[in-house]
Amino acid sequence: QGSLTPDRRTLEALVRAHLDAIPFENLDVMSKLAIRLDLRRAFEKIVVRRRGGFCFEMNLLLGAVLLALGFDARYGLARVWRPEAPGSLASNAVDCASVRTDQTPAWGGAQAASHIIVHVRFPDGSSAIADVGFGEPPRVAAVAGSFHDGSHDFRITRRGPLHVLERKSRGAPGLQGIVSPPGTWEPRILFDTRTSRPRSHYEPGLAAVQDPKYDTIFTRSPFATRTRPDGVRVTLNGNTFKLTNGPEVLSSMRLATQEEYFACLSTNFNMPADAPD
C-alpha cells in the first residue's frame, strides 16, 4: 500500500518492499538451469513461483515495474569490485584506480559487465541508482555524495566517466568474503549511467557469472540471503544457516537433512519447498 507517484519516496518504498520479501539466491545456477535476460521468465519465477534470484533477474523486473509506473528509468552496466587475480570474472579488471577521464572501459570477455543496475532520473534533475540484485545494501543511492543505509555508511565517487559505490568497512566480511580494516572505504560496484545499452551488452556478463571457470559466488555453493526490516541478515549458505547483524553472528546452525533445508527456505525466505537444491 502507498503512493505510486513516480518520485524518490515511492522508489524507496518499492525497493524496500522487494528486498523485505524476495531473497537474493543462486539455486537455479547451482542446478545448471540457465538464467536469461527474459522478463516473462523473471516474472514467472519471482512473482508466480515465489522464488528469488540475482541482479540480471531482479533488477530486470524492477526496471520494468518502474517504467510501467511512469518512472524515467533505464538499465546500466556495472561490475562488482573484487581484488582478485587478473583474468577472473570477479577481479576488478576495469580497475577503479586505473580508469582515466579519457578512457571508456571495455566490458567484454573476462571484463564483462557482471552486474546490472537501474538508473532513475527525477523531474528536478537529480538521479539515483536502485539495486535489488546485489544481496547487500544500499537499496537506493543518489548518484552523488555520502549516505547511510542499514548498518553502513556509503558514498559514490567518480572515476573518469564511471561512478564507484564505496562502503565504509565495519570489519565484517560481505557476500564476497572480503574483510577490510574498520573505517576504510571499500569499492563495491563500478557502474555506468551514461547511456542505455542494448541487450547484447549484458548477455556476456550474464553468461560469465554462471560459468564455473570464473569462480564467482554464484557457482561455488547454493545460497539464499535477505536483510530483514530490523537490519538482521538471514543467510543460508550450503547447509549452514546464520543470522548476523554487521560483524556480529547472532546464531548459526548446520542443517542435517534435506527436509530441514527446504523447511529453512520456506520459513526464512518464503520460498516453495520444490525450489532446486
Image: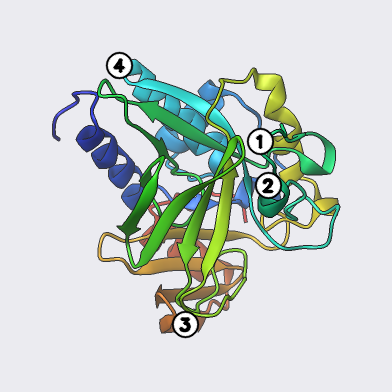
The N terminus - image quarter: top left
Are circles 4 and 2 on residues that touch, CB within 8 Å? no
Residue at screen point 46% across, 57% down: 136
Residue at screen point 24% across, 40% down: 13
Q: Disc 1 marks which residue?
A: 35
In terms of sequence position, does the residue under pointer 1 or pointer 3 come before the other? 1
The reply to whether residue 259 is visible in this rendering is no
Q: Is residue 191 left or right of residue 104?
A: left
Give the number of the mark in front: 1 or 4: 4
User: Element at badge 1?
Assistant: loop
Estimate the x, y position of residue 54 in percent, counting from the top left: 55, 44
- Image quadrant assignment for residue 254: bottom right
Estimate the x, y position of residue 53 in percent, counting from the top left: 53, 44
Q: Is residue 103 left or right of residue 58?
A: right
Are circles 2 and 1 on residues that touch, CB within 8 Å? yes
Q: Disc 2 marks which residue?
A: 29
Give the number of the mark in front: 4 or 2: 4
